[in-house]
Image: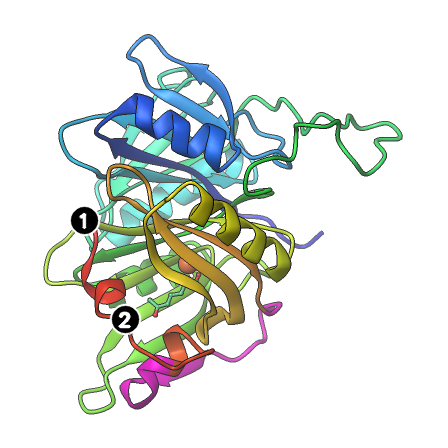
Amino acid sequence: MAMRGVLRMAEVAIRVMDMKAARLHYGERMGLHEVMQDDKGQVYYKAWDEHDHHCLVLREADAPGLDYVAMKVYDDRTLTELESKVRDFGLDVRRIEAGFYPKSGRRIEFTLASGHTMQLYAEKEQIGNTLGQLNPGTTPDEGVIRGFNINRLDHALLGGTNIDQNVELFTKVFDFDLSERIIDHESGISLAVFLTCSTKPHDIAFVLQPEPNRFHHVSFLLESAHDVIKAADKIGKYRIPVDVGPNRHGVTRGATIYFFDPSGNRNEVFAEGYVHYPDTPTIIWDTTDLGGATFAQDNIVRESFLTVLT
Ligand code: M3P
Ligand code: FE
């Protein structure tokens, strides 16, 4: 296995305004598994086919939005190496001791040029996917895969300033590839950038916004485009507000539906997309085909998709 360094988007921490409503949404409706509530009242979730203890943290607050994203790195030595590389790149690095975040080893934290708080860590308690490791079979017990049948956390799209500086950091320091870029066809400036550390089309993406530190969406992986349609049926049944109904992104070629949690944070469930390799060329879309880049089944640019962030 050649993949070392940063492994994946591993934890997203978001603010919700009503924890009871959020639990109904993320737990009962979406079908994520609540694994813990801490002494501050924060609620932790995992998706069924993840081994780590949790991938989503909800904190009750006065306004929605993102607290931080955290990526998991291969091991503690990688974390030490990346800490000095991030400092050499010119960012201030804060050290967070093991245990400060529940079930987690030590972390480093820094602020991206786009204004977002990002963390790296190497260790988190693993509780498995219920199948075990010896002759695990293929199919968990009834009730493990439920709700929208979410397999795992997939990616986050963040809105902010200076997104090209983020590309520098992720490609030079973290060894990500720039899989895709949306540019303004007249000025050539980057409007959105998509970055991968794996064979996924993206692990994190940034969209240019006039203000720093905005949250566009968190996305969860389903097994198939069929599962996206089945999720859409439940989104309709439970009157969950929809931003964009089932469609396929041009960027990433993922089957998608965007909807909102009760606090207005955008969620996505996503499936398919292409396989990225380190030698896959960067794909460029320009604003002459913004409809096709964003929603390729009708080529219509959605105003809300470009302007509603928390
Ligand atoms: C995704 C995705 C934009 C496209 C976003 C794409 C900002 O969120 O999951 O592929 O144009
Ligand atoms: Fe997405």
Is 37 situated left or right of 233 in this image?
left
Q: Residue at x 28, y 45 (%)?
A: 87
**Which of the 4 quarters of the picture holds residue 60?**
top left
Residue on which disc 2 sits? 302
Of residues 271 and 276, the one drawn nearer to the viewer in this rendering: 271
Residue 275 magenta-highlighted: yes
Which residue is situated farthest in the front direction here? 237
Q: Give the range drawn in magenta.
A: 274-291
Q: Which amino acid does label 1 sit on?
A: Asn
Q: Which amino acid does label 2 sit on?
A: Arg
Q: Residue at x 33, y 79 (%)?
A: 300
* Image disc number at residue 107: none
Provide the secondary structure element on which disc 1 rests.
Answer: loop
Residue 100 spot, x, y in % from top left: 35, 17
Which residue is situated farthest in the left direction here? 210
Residue on which disc 1 sits? 213
Which residue is situated farthest in the right direction here? 135
Is 83 situated left or right of 72 in this image?
left
Q: Distance between the residues labelled 1 and 2?
A: 22 Å
